[in-house]
Amino acid sequence: MEDQRKSVLSCMQPTGLMHLGNYFGAVLNWVELQKDYRCFFGVVDYHAMTMPYNIQKLRNNSWDMITDVVAVGVKPENLFIQSLIPEHAELGWIFNCFCSYGHLTRMTQFKDKSKNNEASSKEGFISAGLLDYPVLQAADILIYRANYVPVGKDQDQHLELTRSIAQRFNNTVGKEYFVLPETLHTETPKIKSTADPSRKMSKSAGEKHFIGVFSDEARIRKQIRSAVTDTGDTKPGEMSEGVENLFQLIKASGYKQNEYEQLQKDYSNGELKYSDLKDVVADAIVEMTNVFKERKKELLEDKRELKYKIKQSSEEIRKVAQETVKEVKDLVGLMNIKF
Ligand code: ADP
């Protein structure tokens, strides 16, 4: 029977270690979306080449990310690895010709990233891929005719570009071929660094600024125990960012919810002890991550089985991509001979 559900596409670059920010802010959403939508979740390794990267690590990072997201509940049949589906790059090329150079140079992420890159890399090398990656992103989305894309505010501009490419394409070929994808607004928490709650939890800021989902228990507890609670710049009667972040972590984990309520009451009564709050956060996160670690252990016991599943799912998902590219080539006047 044909799948009648609306489809969702979401991708993530394989950049190593999953932290609590990635999990609560993105991957948990993937797990939830699977209940109501036909999902296409991509590990986008072509995108990971746009900034200077480590060739030795890229392939392993992709597999590590697959293992991590499956361990937290993403179904292998919804997952694909981008470079196993070369049609993404093929459609990306075609879309280059439906996107203006000026539009790409105006993308704020390009401006930001190229500036960072210039500063951090010795040669100040900025790849054309960095400028062009929103076009590849448009291909990632439109190749599956995805109805929805769950994006954060920072990606709104990119979805706009995708729609503009689809529109120009439709106008040029004289057919409403591509459905214009819509943003799917989902509530995902923004997790702050426990070491500095004024900034988001992130790998790029350094070791102490993120808590790894698969870190060992002792490290997780230590990082939470040393979380910054009061930053000194909080107005009277306002909860500090650090304390708010700790409450958020308990709530998002789904564990220790009764304790959460009690701690909230303690806070309102001015009786909250930060050490108690931290203990509950640590217990909740440890309980949650222990389940994931157990699953990851099982997955690693049979790595070949997981790789086989992902190869299969990528092959299945590729059929959708191949169909789109075949139709697109017909529409734009390219050769389409089956050898
Ligand atoms: P990092 O900043 O650690 O390199 P990425 O930029 O690779 O993380 O982010 C991957 C995904 O995780 C994105 O969808 C991003 O929105 C989400 N994400 C990353 N950090 C956080 C955070 N601190 N809170 C919520 N979501 C986050």
Image (cartoon, rainbow, N blue to C red):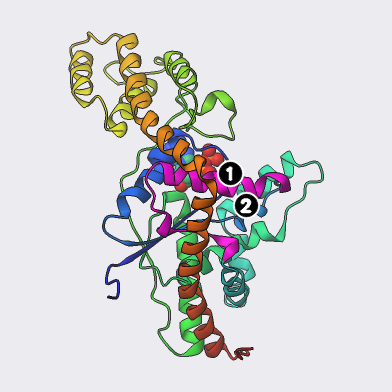
Q: Is residue 241 above or below residue 185?
A: above
Residue type, label 1? Thr
Residue 234 or 121: which is nearer the viewer? 121
Q: Residue at x 46, y 66 (%)?
A: 141
Q: Is residue 333 above or below residue 269?
A: below
Q: Which residue is mark 2?
A: 48
- Residue 203 in the figure: left or right of residue 235: right
Contact flag, marks 1 and 2 (Cβ < 8 Å): yes
Asked whether 185 falls inside the magenta stretch, the response is: no
Please identify the quarter of the rendering in which residue 119 is found. Answer: top right
Quarter of the image with the N terminus is bottom left
* Mark 1 vs ligand 1: CB below 8 Å: yes
Residue 125 or 225: which is nearer the viewer? 225
Q: Which residue is mark 1?
A: 15
Q: Can residue 102 be seen in the rendering of this structure?
A: yes
Q: Secondary structure at mark 1?
A: loop
- Say how many tags the image has: 2
> Residue 246 at what x, y percent from top left?
35, 23
